[in-house]
């Protein structure tokens, strides 16, 4: 049902955990639907210096979370915002059709974390003024 | 992490065919290949084998006569035949059908289909153990009710319904009682006469017979409309040349089930309770689904908070253990099991449910192996989950 790459990420998820002093945090999904994902990002010089995730969900939800942290780490914020659910699924060698919503979540969670960073930065700048 | 070891505990999904059953079937593919409807010796040999099995199935459920047993292609057909057959044939007496909220999809969707044909369907609630609420049955049962269809024991939560009490209520309004005994028959004693069951669905594979064969018991005097029209086999109720090799296998399986039920269920209950205890005791925030004692001997249904079922299944599968889950993520749809929601579980609790169904070949050693795996699987997934309380990850 799953590709070897999905199983590999499920068994050995990359960048799993939290960043206590994260610059941005994005949570998407709902445990009611069976999937909940949180992405933490640390930003330095407009790049994702560090990224971590925590996920409640099925095997592909965990694998896509892991995969997106690998794809996004080190990228500029603009590059990271362009990562799509299709990119994540492709990198994993494909996902079963019914699971495509899970990888959708991973991209959404990353984008939400970056938007959270922008919002916090804007608030900080306003405060300075 | 892959392993050569394989432990199968998903018997509700499919069972191996007993080797004694295979032995019984072979001559009916190689030697006795006649058609039971033929007049010649080949046909008459086949006819005799067919009628012998009818007797065995009747004996297993204590039916009043063997003619009350109709062979079908399995539980889905039997459920369709019972519900559509009774409803269509008796619609002059009423158009209301009552069922429960923990039925198999072949009952749920048949009842829903009939609502597009002028019938009304009522889905009774169940309590937290999964028992059908009898006061709701009494309330919903009107003079217009033609059929009540209740599962003997739901395969996902294992709860065994109080059939005698249900039957008494149903018959007080002269409705018919259909019982889906797919998961229960062959595992626990069923007595259609004593329990007041009018129609009973029986499946072969659930008693270690071949797949794709089953039966519907129809009490003498009850009229139903057939699903299949044709050559008029099975008293005109189920046309089509009989699948004799499978029917013979079904008969042998029923015979073995009847003889060995008591010793086997004793063994299964011991394994079941050992597994339940081992899965729950060492792990915090773990719970049993269904009733602790009034449950099928083979059924273990548990849930773990903060994690999701499919990821547990995958983790078990990596260690060679086959189980199943109430999670949406293992199904074709994205909804979690309707039976688990019906017993009052929240969506996330249903998603975190895990089912082990035991079988004839499982051993205590296998149970202990599964028990030994679970704490580290749960711990790892809880470490990944954002829902886990901090103290659990320390």
Image (tube, coloured by chain):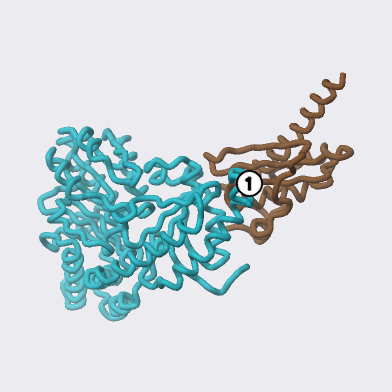
Chain colours: A brown, B cyan
Tell me where residue B323 appears, x and y as whole percent: 47, 60
Is residue B248 shown to the viewer in this render? no
**Residue in the image at 76% along x and 39% along y:** A22
Image spot of residue A38 (x, y percent): 67, 41
Dot 1: what SS?
strand
Q: Can residue A54 be seen in this view?
A: yes
Question: Quarter of the image holding residue B147?
Answer: top left
Q: Which of A109 and A38 is in front in this view?
A: A38
> Which quadrant does the C terminus of chain A fall into?
top right
Which residue in the structure is indicated by mark 1?
A: A55
Image point (85%, 41%), residue name: A47
Q: Which residue lies furthest to the top in this view?
A: A129
Task: Tell me: B75 left or right of A15.
Answer: left
x and y, in percent, of residue B357 in the image: 40, 61
Q: In this view, does B201 lie to the left or right of A47?
A: left
User: Is residue A63 shown above or below B4?
Assistant: above
Q: In this view, does B227 lie above or below A8?
A: above
Q: Which of B355 and B228 is in front in this view?
A: B355
Residue at the right extreme of this rendering: A45
> Toward which corner of the image does residue A51 lie, by quadrant?
top right
Image quarter where the N terminus of chain A lies is bottom right
In percent of the image, x 77 and y 48: which residue is there? A71
For disc 1, the chain is: A
Left or right of residue B191: residue B121: right
């Amino acid at each position: 049902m799953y590709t070897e790459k999905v199983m590999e990420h499920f068994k050995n998820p990359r960048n799993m955990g939290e960043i206590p002093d994260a610059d941005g945090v994005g949570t998407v999904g709902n445990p009611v639907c069976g999937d909940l994902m949180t992405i933490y990002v640390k930003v330095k010089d407009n790049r994702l210096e560090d990224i971590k995730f925590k996920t409640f969900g099925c095997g592909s939800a965990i694998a896509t979370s892991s995969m997106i942290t690998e794809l996004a780490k080190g990228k500029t914020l603009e590059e990271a915002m362009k990562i799509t659910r299709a990119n994540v699924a492709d990198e994993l060698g494909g996902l079963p059709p019914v699971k495509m919503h899970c990888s959708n979540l991973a991209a959404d969670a990353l984008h939400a974390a970056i938007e959270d960073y922008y919002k916090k930065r804007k608030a900080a700048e306003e405060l300075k003024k | 992490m892959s392993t050569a070891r394989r432990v199968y505990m998903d018997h509700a999904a499919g069972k191996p065919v007993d080797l004694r059953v295979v032995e019984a079937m072979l001559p009916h593919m190689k030697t006795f290949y006649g058609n039971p409807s033929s007049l010649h010796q080949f046909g008459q040999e086949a006819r005799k084998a067919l009628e012998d099995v009818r007797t065995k199935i009747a004996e297993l459920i204590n039916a009043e006569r063997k003619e009350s047993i109709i062979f079908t292609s399995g539980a889905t057909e039997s459920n369709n035949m019972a519900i559509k057959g009774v409803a269509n044939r008796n619609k002059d007496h009423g158009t209301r059908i009552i069922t429960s909220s923990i039925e198999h999809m072949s009952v749920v969707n048949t009842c829903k289909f009939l609502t597009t044909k002028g019938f009304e369907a009522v889905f009774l609630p169940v309590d937290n153990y999964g028992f059908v609420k009898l006061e709701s049955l009494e309330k919903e049962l009107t003079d217009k009710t033609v059929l009540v269809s209740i599962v003997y024991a739901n395969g996902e939560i294992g709860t065994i319904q109080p059939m005698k009490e249900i039957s008494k209520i149903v018959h007080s309004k002269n409705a018919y009682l259909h019982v889906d005994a797919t998961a229960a028959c062959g595992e626990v004693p069923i007595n259609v006469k004593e329990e007041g069951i009018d129609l009973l669905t029986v499946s072969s594979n659930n008693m270690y017979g071949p797949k794709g064969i089953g039966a519907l018991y129809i009490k003498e005097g009850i009229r139903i409309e057939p699903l299949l029209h044709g050559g008029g086999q099975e008293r005109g109720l189920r046309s089509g040349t009989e699948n004799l090799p499978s029917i013979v296998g079904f008969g042998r399986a029923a015979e073995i089930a009847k003889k060995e039920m008591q010793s086997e269920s004793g063994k299964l209950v011991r394994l079941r309770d050992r597994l339940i205890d081992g899965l729950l005791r060492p792990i915090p925030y773990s719970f049993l689904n269904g009733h602790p004692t009034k449950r099928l001997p083979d059924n273990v249904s548990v849930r773990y908070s903060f994690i999701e079922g499919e990821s547990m299944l995958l983790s078990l599968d990596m260690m060679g253990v086959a189980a199943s889950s109430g999670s949406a993520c293992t199904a074709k749809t994205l909804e979690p099991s309707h039976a688990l929601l019906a017993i009052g579980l929240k969506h996330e609790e249903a998603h975190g449910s895990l089912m082990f169904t035991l079988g004839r070949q499982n051993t205590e050693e296998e149970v202990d192996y599964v028990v030994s795996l679970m704490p580290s699987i749960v711990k790892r997934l809880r470490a990944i989950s954002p829902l886990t309380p901090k103290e659990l990850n320390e």
